[in-house]
Image (tube, grey):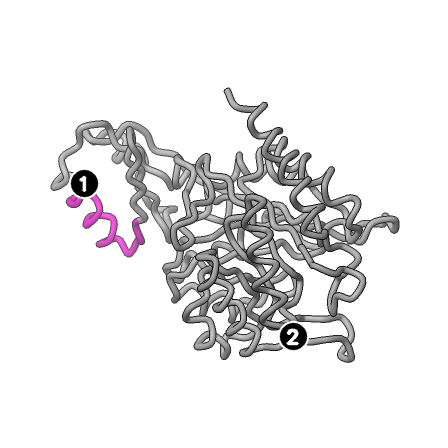
Amino acid sequence: MVIVLKQGVKEEQQEQLIRWFEEQNLGVHVSQGEYQTVLGLIGDTASVDTDLIEGLDIVEAVKRISDPFKKANLRFHPEYSVIDCSGVKIGGGHFAVIAGPCSVESKEQVCGIAKQVQASGASLLRGGAFKPRTSPYDFQGLKAEGIEFLLEAKKQTGMPIVTEIMNANHLPLFEQVDVIQVGARNMQNFELLKELGRTKKPILLKRGLANTLKELLMSAEYIMAGGNENIILCERGIRTFETYTRNTLDLSAVPMLRELTHLPVVIDPSHACGIAKLVRPMAIAAAAAGADGLMIEVHNDPPRALCDGAQSLTPEQFDGTMKKVFAVREALKD
């Protein structure tokens, strides 16, 4: 249930109403906007008398929410969230590009790529230290050493770093990581999501390759229910019957999620397509669709990459892609 308060409500009146709800064993989520304050009730609201609440002098409107996701719901939080990633903002009109190699291979590699993508307009550096792979015989990442190399790249460039976690036991290794990524395979690893809910770090939550948007939002709800509301959603392609591309990029997810949630949405065209030459047109299309950011894989020598070289852009290709993306965004300005 959502309760919209009238403008000019005194703080003591708001606090008195919140205490009254809490006495009925309801959680209260307060969303303080520029023009409006919204109280979101969490729990069993079936017995709440909506007529009684609507009759209060300080209440403008009462709305029941049938969606199972509450804290991620746009009606709970009418203004789009802006997630601060160590100084880089995503959402609410702030556009950011996350770029870097699929896998961290060496200090020289990741530091060199970081400087190149930064020069082309990327504001966050991505790189896999822990790599979930379909085959147990494929490269699994440098793990703790990979995070050390990412931190060195951050030291040299100032770029916040984004890297994937696979196990809650690894959280101590992520203390200096700016954004923790939850990969598609772990989107419904609920125990991991609960642990991430106890952190305050921004979480980049990727949609599972066979999951609906509602399931993605429910996974975000797991993290938010634990107290961490710094969530960035990522569409990275879903599995369909199409075989020419690795996955099918669901660009309709951008405008649909904008109607459902206040959380920012970024697009990963690299994993969605699996083919480097398709990354540029899909990145441009994502920008045109209104995405809050992009996540793109860049490698200095894709044919020799230890992971996903076929979908990685060279730094030169990335630079050209960014010029097109920023041109589209400029053209779409009101």
Q: Is residue 322 magenta?
A: no
Q: Is residue 33 above or below residue 46?
A: above
x%, y% of residue 211? Answer: 67, 54
User: Which type of secondary structure does the marked residue at label 1 adopt?
Assistant: helix
Highlighted magenta segment, given as a residue range: 14-28
User: Are there few (<14), some (14-19), or many (20+) residues within 10 Å of tag 1?
Assistant: some
Q: Residue at x 37, y 53 (%)?
A: 43
Q: Name the residue beneath numbered marker 1.
A: 14
Q: Which mark is residue 180?
A: none
Q: Is residue 27 magenta?
A: yes
x%, y% of residue 317? Answer: 71, 46
Q: Quadrant of the N terminus?
A: top left
Q: What amino acid type is highlighted by mark number 1?
A: Gln
Q: Name the residue beneath numbered marker 2.
A: 141
**Hey, which residue is sitting farthest right in the picture?**
243
For the residues carrying marks 2 and 1, which lies nearer the camera in this image?
A: 2
User: Which type of secondary structure does the marked residue at label 2 adopt?
Assistant: loop
Say whether residue 215 is visible: no
Of residues 94 and 54, which is closer to you in this image? 94
Label 2, label 1: how many angstroms apart (C-alpha)? 51 Å
Q: Residue at x 31, y 35 (%)?
A: 33
Q: What amino acid type is highlighted by mark number 2?
A: Gly
Q: Is 223 on the left or on the right of 4, as rendered?
A: right
Q: Residue at x 37, y 61 (%)?
A: 200
